[in-house]
Image (cartoon, rainbow, N blue to C red):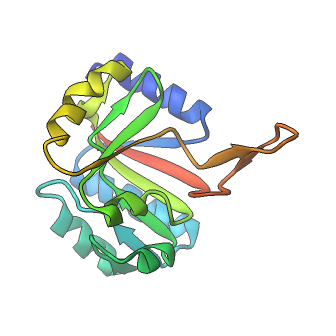
Amino acid sequence: MSGRALQVFAERFSEQGGRLRTASGHEAVLNALIEELRSSGGRRVCIATPWDGFGGELLEALKAEFEVIGPRARPREIASCDAGITFPVAAVAETGSILEINFDDSDRLVSSLPPLHLAILKGSSVLERLVDVAPLIREASRRNFAVTLISGPSRTGDIELRLVMGVHGPHSTVVVVEV
């Protein structure tokens, strides 16, 4: 990842209604997540299957203040949450999108059912072009999987071409990039 790729990703993601925060190290990422959850007023948080080495730390930090629904929750439990936390495998600067590859339906729903979607992204995984995600998808295809590209909060246009945010999914999407 280049600094330029992160800058382009931030600009494009923001243009599509998403917000980006950067944080240096796990502790700063945790603090940013807790800040976002506090400011949203959310109490119930669901978490997708985390990266290696980050899950236990995240669960412990959140459990002190929030009701946490762990990975592989049932859809009804996920839908009852105020926020969902996911772990995209990459971001694409060219499109301003994050890439989630999920091997479990409940992980996929964490980014689409709660009104607030928080995504934790490793800064080193920001790719310049959409075509650069092909090897990640090819590797995932060895198992049953779902690929989702997310470019900010849910939005739809009505017949009068008015853009409405959050109708069929999250009202806001925040990506916390660990740099």
Residue 87 lies, in percent from the top left, at: 30, 51
Question: In the image, what residue occupies the spot 16% across and 49% down?
Answer: 143
Front-most of 67 and 107? 107
Residue 153: percent from the left, percent from the top? 57, 48
Position of residue 132 in the picture relative to residue 164 (left or right):
left
Q: Quadrant of the C terminus?
A: top left
Q: Residue at x 52, y 73 (%)?
A: 42
Please count the marks in the image. 0
Looking at the image, is 31 positioned above or below residue 130?
below
Residue pictured at 23% horizontal, 75% vertical: 60
Q: Quadrant of residue 157?
A: top right
> What quarter of the picture does the N terminus occupy?
top left
Tell which of 136 and 59 is nearer to you. 136
- Position of residue 54 in the picture relative to residue 93 (left or right): left
Eyeballing the image, is 84 above or below 177?
below
**Residue drawn 42% across and 74% down?**
75
Q: Position of residue 144 (x, y in %)?
A: 21, 51
Q: Nearer the viewer, residue 27 or 129?
A: 129
In which quarter of the view is residue 34 placed? bottom left
Of 96 and 139, nearer the camera is 139
Reply above or below: 97 against 93.
below
Q: Where residue 121 sits in the image (x, y, percent)?
A: 31, 43
